[in-house]
Image (tube, rainbow, N blue to C red):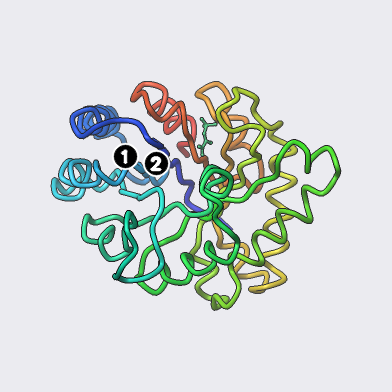
């Protein structure tokens, strides 16, 4: 089963509009002459306030090499939800992906598995693709509950999602102790956990659908680590935080994930 790799940059709460435009243009320029079929699917997730300017620099210019994502959404279509942004509002910018369940959202903003499931269902209904994050804390890893914790996060996030829709979601395995710490999870261990995720998906959606799901690794991915990560059987790309904030390092990671 060949799955097209994805390299997604999560810009987190960085970059105003001018900085976002500069970054996306630099990425665009660096990859514009590369054969499209050799490139991984390249995704950038700016802050909500930069969705417009990034969209203008990619979607509206017919750049097929970069896709737009949001870092979060709310599951209700509209109403009295101060500070939230709906999926249709994000879709309006031409976004194709929405990251949900990032550990920063779970830990800092108390997002629950139930909320993440509601978001996943609403994103799929809107015709977009959720990038569903999961991952264990260092404490859970040391207690030996990594696999059961991750399996439970996946089962809960995809409750009531049709097996054929599960085939199209993207999962990001992001051990929390590796995010923003410079400590990358060993590639073979990341691959092992990703296989646990794929087996969990097979139990809920069937093996054929599970084999189609792209599962990314995230956690201090750098230009120096990507080749080894991509050489693993089940790692289908990367969700990149810090190293996606500089065009040079992000482009190196993209190139490292090329066929
Ligand atoms: C992330 O925020 O999803 C992430 C993986 O960050 P970093 O690459 O900086 O560890």
Label 2 sits on a secondary structure element that is loop
Q: Position of residue 221 (x, y in %)?
A: 55, 30
At 60% across and 22% down in the image, what residue appears?
A: 182
Q: Which residue is rendered at x = 56% and y = 62% of the image?
A: 212
What is the x, y in percent for residue 161?
A: 54, 75
In the rendered view, tell whether residue 160 sits above or below residue 148.
below
On the image, the x and y values in percent for residue 139 come to: 78, 38
Label 1 sits on residue? 35
On whether ligand 1 comes within 8 Å of the CB at mark 2, the answer is no
Tell me whether circle 2 and circle 1 mark residues in contact (CB < 8 Å): yes
The answer to whether 24 appears left or right of 199 in the picture is: left
Other-residue count near label 2 (Cα within 10 Å), few / some / many at <14 / 14–19 / ≥20? few
Name the residue: 38% across, 57% down.
Answer: 73
- The image quarter containing residue 54 is top left
Q: Where is residue 137 shown, x and y percent of the image?
A: 71, 40
> Do we see residue 33 in this rendering?
no
Q: Secondary structure at mark 1?
A: loop
């Amino acid at each position: 089963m060949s799955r097209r790799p994805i390299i997604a940059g999560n810009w987190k709460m960085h970059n105003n509009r001018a900085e976002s435009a500069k970054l996306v243009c630099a990425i665009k320029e660096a990859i514009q002459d590369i054969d499209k079929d050799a490139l991984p699917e390249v995704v950038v997730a700016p802050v909500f306030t930069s969705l417009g300017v990034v969209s203008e620099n990619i979607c509206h210019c017919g750049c097929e090499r970069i896709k737009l994502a949001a870092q979060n959404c709310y599951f209700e279509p509209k109403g009295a939800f101060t500070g939230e942004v709906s999926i249709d509002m994000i879709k309006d910018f031409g976004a194709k992906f929405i990251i949900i369940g990032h550990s920063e959202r779970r830990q800092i903003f108390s997002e629950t598995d139930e909320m993440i499931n509601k978001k996943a269902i609403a994103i799929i209904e809107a015709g977009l693709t959720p990038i569903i994050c999961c991952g264990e804390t260092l404490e859970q890893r040391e207690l030996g509950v990594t696999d059961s914790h991750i399996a439970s996060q996946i089962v809960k996030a995809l409750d009531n999602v049709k097996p054929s829709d599960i085939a199209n979601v993207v999962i990001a395995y992001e051990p929390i102790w590796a995010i923003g710490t410079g400590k990358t999870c060993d590639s073979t261990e990341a691959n092992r956990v990703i296989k646990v995720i794929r087996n969990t998906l097979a139990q809920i959606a069937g093996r054929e659908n599970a084999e189609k799901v792209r599962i990314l690794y995230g956690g201090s991915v750098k230009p120096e680590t990507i080749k080894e990560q991509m050489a693993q059987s089940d790692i289908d790309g990367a969700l990149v935080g810090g190293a996606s904030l500089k065009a040079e390092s992000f482009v190196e990671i993209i190139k490292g994930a090329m066929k």
